[in-house]
Image (cartoon, grey):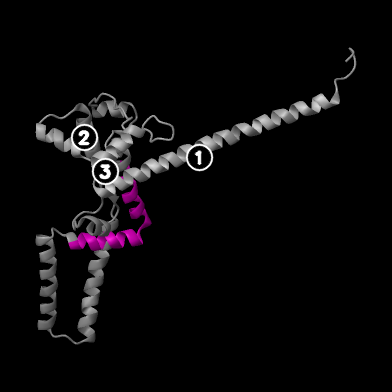
Amino acid sequence: MRLGRPPCCCITQLQPAAARRRLRLLPARAANTSSKAASRRSAVLGQVDDELQKGNDEAALSLVRSSLGEGGGLRCFGAARQVPQRLYKLDELKLNGIDTSSFLSPVDRTLGSIERNFQIAAVLGGLSVSAVFELSQFQVLFLFVGLLFVWSVDLIYFNGGVRNLVLDTVGHNLSQKYHNRVIQHEAGHFLIAYLLGVLPKEYTITSLDTLMKQGSLNVQAGTAFVDFEFVEEINTGKLSAMVRISIKSCFLQRM
């Protein structure tokens, strides 16, 4: 090629095409690697879930720990680190513009309003039944005493479990806000425990779900953990620093 002549047109056309081919290969490799990692992570989670269902808590925890740091393994288990605790005075919080009311537990009046509506409906229903069937005063009194007896048995023997079961079931079906709040609350337990190195075992969202899975009547919702290491340290009378931090954090989150 002589000086002053334009470069060959075939070269100018082939170079961008080759570059485009190289650029197209890179995302393909990245997508392939990502899919393999996701498949392996899914397989590990499936093995962990199988071991938990069999009751092999130690094997499940060992699977989680052995997969950390590997390609496609689980991530962030026990990766959380807490800052040193410090007690702040109210004046310091106000000086930094922090609203102290945000630290209080949120108040949800959903179940209270449902209970009041049930009570109003029960009174109106009783009056309607009395008028339709022309019940005598003695029959109305007998019906009232019977309902009061059932309520007392539930309150004393089941600690209000039947009442809470009915209210919670109705609340989840009628109030999406209440349903979402319970889910977010239990997700907080799940996430904090996982980050602190405490393996979540199972969770329940409704009182009915808890009754069917665990046979517990007076439990609204909850998260169970793999706690054999904690039980062993309790039996020896010596708690490690991580166990104390985990217990305290999960307890605070439950509040």
- Tell which circle, 2 or 1, labels the residue nearer the N-terminal end: 1
Which mark is on residue 35?
Answer: 1
Asked if disc 2 and disc 1 are in contact, CB closer than 8 Å, the reply is no
**In the rendered image, is residue 112 in sight?**
no
Nearest to the eye among marks 3 and 2: give it.
2
Tell me: residue 76, above or below residue 147: above
SS at badge 3 = loop
In the image, residue 102 lies at what x, y percent?
A: 31, 38
Residue in the picture at 13% in, 75% down: 144
Q: Considering depth in this image, is 61 or 225 the residue closer to the camera?
A: 61
Res. 249 image quadrant: top left
Q: Considering depth in this image, is 34 or 179 the residue closer to the camera?
A: 34
**Membership of 180 in magenta stretch:** yes
Q: In 3D space, how far apart are the residues under numbered discs 1 and 3 (Cα atoms)?
A: 41 Å
**Membership of 208 in magenta stretch:** no
Amino acid type at mark 3: Ser
- Tell which circle, 1 or 3, labels the residue nearer the N-terminal end: 1
User: Which range of residues does the magenta coloring cover?
Assistant: 162-188
Which mark is on residue 248?
Answer: 2
Q: In 3D space, how far apart are the residues under numbered discs 2 and 1 (Cα atoms)?
A: 38 Å
- Tell which circle, 3 or 2, labels the residue nearer the N-terminal end: 3
Amino acid type at mark 2: Lys
Nearest to the eye among marks 2 and 1: give it.
1
Q: Is residue 239 left or right of residue 33?
A: left
In the image, residue 101 lies at what x, y percent?
A: 29, 39
Amino acid type at mark 1: Ser
At label 2, counting other C-alpha atoms closer than 10 Å, the crowd grade (few under 14, some 14-19, many 20 or more) is few
Residue in the picture at 26% in, 43% down: 105
In the image, residue 180 lies at what x, y percent?
A: 36, 51
Q: Which residue is mark 3?
A: 105
